[in-house]
Structures are given as C-alpha cells and as structure tokens.
Amino acid sequence: MLIVLLGAPGSGKGTQCNLLVQQLKLPHLSTGELFRFHISQSTPLGKRAQEFIQHGQLVPDDLVVELVTEELGNDRCREGCLLDGFPRTVAQAERLERYLVEQDRHLTAVVVLEAEEQELRRRMLRRGELENRQDDTPETIARRMDVYRRETAPLIDFYGEKGILHRVDGTGSPDEVNQRVCAELGV
Ligand code: ADP
C-alpha cells in the first residue's frame, strides 16, 4: 500500500501518519522530518534545504525527488509506505508517477485532510511554542499557506481526476480524524 497524505501546513498529516504507521504497519516517509534531520546533522542536503525551509519556501523539486525516490527504493518501503509532505507540486506528482511506473508500482490512495485556515494557523502557532520549529512563526506560516494554495492545492484536482482522492474532515481530535481516515481507506 502506497498512501499519500495531503493537506495544508498544520492539517495534521504527521499526527495521522503516526497513528496509521501502527495500524497499517507501514513505514512513514515525511519529507519535512527528513529535511529537519539533515539540517540538524548539517549534511550537504540539509545545508541546501535550510534556507528554503526557514523562509517557508519549497525546497527545489530536484532535491526532494532525489531524496524520496532514494527512500522509496529502500527495502523498508518495498511493501509500501505513507508519504507525508510529498508530492507538494504537480511537477513532483508527475515525477513520482513516472518513477512508480518504471518500478511497476502505483499509488493506492491519496488522503487530503481539510480544515479551516484559522484553525490551521492556531495549531501551528501552538506547535511553534511546543516544538520550537523554526518555520512555525507567524510570518513563515503565512508564506507556507500561500505556497500551499498556489503549489499544492492543485494536486487535489490532479488526484481527483485519477479517482484515488479521499477527502477527510481534519477537525476534531486526532482519534476522531483517524477514524474518518480509516473509514475512507476501508482499513
Ligand atoms: P508542513 O506541512 O506543516 O508545512 P513539513 O514538515 O511537511 O510541514 O514541511 C516543512 C518544510 O519542508 C516545508 O515548508 C518545505 O520548505 C519543506 N518541504 C517538505 N516537503 C517538501 C516537498 N515535497 N517539496 C518541497 N519542499 C518540501
């Protein structure tokens, strides 16, 4: 099972993936987490990604695609995985599709978590205080929301046309959202 979790910043993709990891026994591939790890270790990739992330911009497609396809090629992702934060642009989605076709694989489902912008902003400001994430500041949050609307939201139509999109109400407690996600996925 190869599942994509889609949603605006703060929509709860990471939280839902953490729950699904246990339920579906699939590895969790979060591009945001991978980048944060590389930044904390000052790897060459981390150094290149840092500027973009700090300013709420997307990391260039080439860097992200390289990172994700390398991970997807790993043994641990052979049976599938939960993709969180990728793809984030139509160009990334097209490149993912080409890669999967070459491997004779395909996406099982795309879940989009939906919530009002005001609620998303509130969650991120709280997370910024709790986790000290460098990109959860009011200014950067606004930029990320903008980037989501412009670059990522078009993926809803992209996957809708392919018939694999599942829209889920992302409001309420993590458990409530999880139940809706599982019901949508039929798991
Ligand atoms: P959120 O979805 O809450 O913004 P993430 O942890 O998924 O948080 O991502 C944090 C940042 O990492 C993004 O704002 C972006 O700069 C970078 N990033 C993550 N995934 C991608 C991607 N697929 N393409 C480009 N940049 C990405």
Image (cartoon, rainbow, N blue to C red):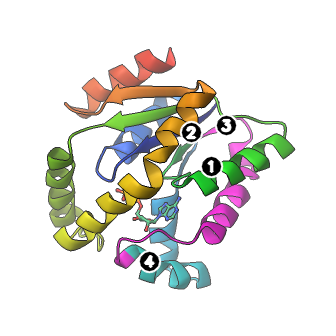
Q: Which is nearer the eye, 132 or 115? A: 115
Q: Residue 163: where, in percent of width, then height?
A: 59, 24
Tell me which amino acid carries mark 3: Gly
User: Are circles 1 and 2 on residues that touch, CB within 8 Å?
Assistant: yes
Q: In the rendered structure, which segment of residues is drawn in magenta?
A: 54-81
Q: Which residue is mark 1?
A: 93
**Pair 1/2: label in front:** 2
Q: Which residue is mark 4?
A: 52
**Pair 3/1: label in front:** 1
Instruction: State the count of labels.
Output: 4
The picture quadrant for ligand 1 comes to: bottom left
The tag on residue 158 is 2
Q: Quadrant of residue 25?
A: top right
Alpha carbon of mark 2 to alpha carbon of mark 4: how far? Answer: 25 Å
| Quadrant, the N terminus | top right
Dot placed on the residue nearer the N-terminal end, 3 or 2 = 3
* Mark 4 surroundings within 10 Å by alpha-carbon count, few (fewer than 14), some (14 through 19), many (20 or more): some
Dot placed on the residue nearer the N-terminal end, 3 or 1 = 3
